């Protein structure tokens, strides 16, 4: 009986391992009303910035434990909890082009609803070759 339980435990462990890690998801909502467009340039998309237009919702997924963003051609790394989902709202005011704040899922969805956001565009940033 112990052998059967041991084999079952190993099998279940292998099955869960075979599914791989859940990607980290970052939701961005551009709630600005100015003429500027926020752009996200990462170490994984150097050739093409991710543009988030006004009232647009973008989802960036990564299988890595950090997101490398480029600031004046230098990488800076934001550490992420693997498999976690993050929600950010982009705003602006008369003093700053953009400012970003992390919000709860509920607040994010209400902002998307009241700002009549577009359906989310998804971007996959993978450290592995496709």
Image (cartoon, helix red, strand yellow):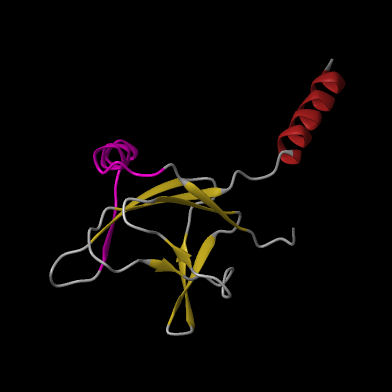
102 magenta-colored: yes
Taking the spot 27% from the left edge, 53% from the top edge, the residue there is: 31
Taking the spot 37% from the left edge, 51% from the top edge, the residue there is: 56
- In this rendering, is residue 29 above or below 114? below
Of all residues, the one furthest to the top in this rendering is 1
Taking the spot 66% from the left edge, 62% from the top edge, the residue there is: 127
- In this rendering, is residue 40 above or below 105? below
Is 56 left or right of 93, judged from the image as shown? right
Residue 91 in picture, x, y percent from top left: 24, 59
Report the span colored magenta: 98-118
Q: Nearer the viewer, residue 113 or 68?
A: 113
Is 11 left or right of 98, judged from the image as shown? right
Which quarter of the image is occupied by the C terminus? Answer: bottom right
Which quarter of the image is occupied by the N terminus? Answer: top right
Residue 109 in picture, x, y percent from top left: 32, 38
56 magenta-colored: no
Q: Nearer the viewer, residue 94 or 7?
A: 94
Residue 9 in picture, x, y percent from top left: 76, 27
Q: Quadrant of residue 20?
A: top right
Of all residues, the one furthest to the front in this rendering is 35
Residue 98 in picture, x, y percent from top left: 26, 67
Q: How many marks?
A: 0
């Amino acid at each position: 009986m112990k052998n059967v339980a041991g084999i079952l435990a190993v099998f279940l462990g292998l099955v869960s391992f075979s599914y791989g890690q859940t990607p980290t998801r970052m939701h961005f909502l551009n709630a600005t009303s100015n003429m500027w467009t926020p752009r996200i340039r990462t170490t994984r998309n150097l050739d093409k910035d991710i543009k988030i237009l006004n009232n647009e919702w973008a989802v960036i997924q990564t299988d890595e434990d950090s997101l490398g963003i480029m600031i004046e051609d230098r990488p800076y790394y934001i550490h992420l909890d693997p498999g976690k989902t993050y929600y950010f709202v982009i705003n602006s005011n008369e003093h700053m082009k953009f400012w970003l704040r992390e919000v709860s899922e509920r607040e994010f969805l209400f902002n998307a609803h009241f700002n009549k956001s577009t359906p989310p565009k998804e971007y996959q940033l993978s450290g592995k070759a496709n």
